Image (cartoon, helix red, strand yellow):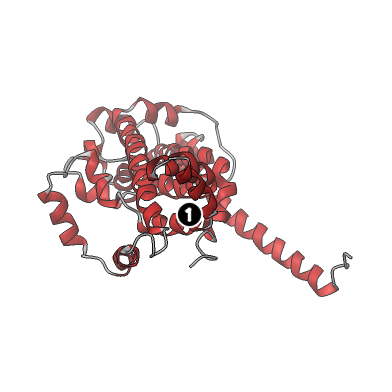
Amino acid sequence: MIHAASFSRKWFNVFNYTLLILLSVACVLPLIHVLAISFSSNSAATAGVVKLWPVDFNTKSYEFVLSTGKFTDAFLISVKRVLLGTFVNMLLTILTAYPLAKETSRFRPRTWYAWFFVLTILFGGGLIPWYMIIRATGLLDTIWALVLPGAVPVFSVILLLNFFRGIPKELEEAAFIDGAGHLSTLVRIIVPLSVPALATIMLFTVVGHWNAWFDGLILMNSPAHYPLQSYLQTVVIQKDFTALGEEELKSLKVISDRTIKAAEIILGALPVLVVYPFLQKYFMKGIVLGSVKE
């Protein structure tokens, strides 16, 4: 029998929905404001009269940004980083989580390996040793410096191994009876059944690589090798225009730097905004993915 909601429950729902709507609006309004500035004229943006709607609508800032080599190069470096980083992270996460998901009776050192990975979350070597190791391996100023140091995301490994434990053991045993090995079982049975978990981890990985900027500033010796977020951090946040060329600096006299920065921010966030809605349904699953298994 379905009981009608109580009066207090109804008011709680009203308060809850109202609060969530206000929080959502507070998150979206700054982005809308930046979008409006990017489509506004030089004079309107400089005067600060642009609010949530473009003033003197034009696309000159986007034309300028897309025509400059620095932004395009940084954008392509970030795309390359996301593709390489996601592939390496997902491959090593799957290969690491699969044996760690086994019982101790089937993989005796499982507990020791699991604690080894957990300790890397609790304790770190520090920024300077991290940098010295990357420099000693000759990775500085290369795309691999942005990919290999975080090749095995331990948090993702923990999420995935807990999901693997929830898959019925009978499926794996049936595969072994039919003559399949561990690799064949992993590729043909475990991975296809783990699509929700893998999609969640992939979402975290893509967003993490795309938004990372600090490692680019430290590990890249030349601004020409900056990924997009590092480039935006130097030009937009620190207002360091040394990364811009001479012709681009001359164009700033015609086009407002505020509209250019706004256009770069929108273009930098656009890929994630496009991809996220397709993976959003897996996001809530990822939050509780490892909460019901030991």
Q: Position of residue 85 (x, y in %)?
A: 33, 42
Q: Position of residue 37 (x, y in %)?
A: 50, 40
Residue 75 vs 195, above or below: the answer is above
On screen, residue 82 versus residue 281, left or right, reads: left
Residue in the image at 58% along x and 56% along y:
26
On screen, residue 9 versus residue 265, left or right, reads: right
Query: Which residue position is annotated with label 1?
Result: 164
As drawn, which residue projects farthest toward the bottom? 8
Residue in the image at 65% along x and 60% along y:
20
Residue 49 is at least partly visible in this image: no
Q: Position of residue 229 (x, y in %)?
A: 34, 44
Q: How many marks?
A: 1
On screen, residue 13 versus residue 67, left or right, reads: right
Residue in the image at 55% along x and 54% along y:
168
Q: Quadrant of residue 113?
A: bottom left
Residue 156 vs 176, above or below: the answer is below
| Front residue of this view, candidates 107 and 129 | 107
As drawn, which residue projects farthest toward the left? 136
| Front residue of this view, candidates 158 and 54 | 158
Q: Quadrant of the N terminus?
A: bottom right
On screen, residue 246 versus residue 253, left or right, reads: left
Residue in the image at 18% along x and 40% along y:
222
Residue 105 is at least partly visible in this image: yes
Q: Position of residue 65 (x, y in %)?
A: 38, 31
Dot 1: what SS?
A: helix
Residue type at the position of mark 1: Phe
| Front residue of this view, candidates 56 and 178 | 178
Residue 223 vs 27, above or below: the answer is above
Q: Residues within 10 Å of mark 1 (few under 14, many from 20)?
A: many
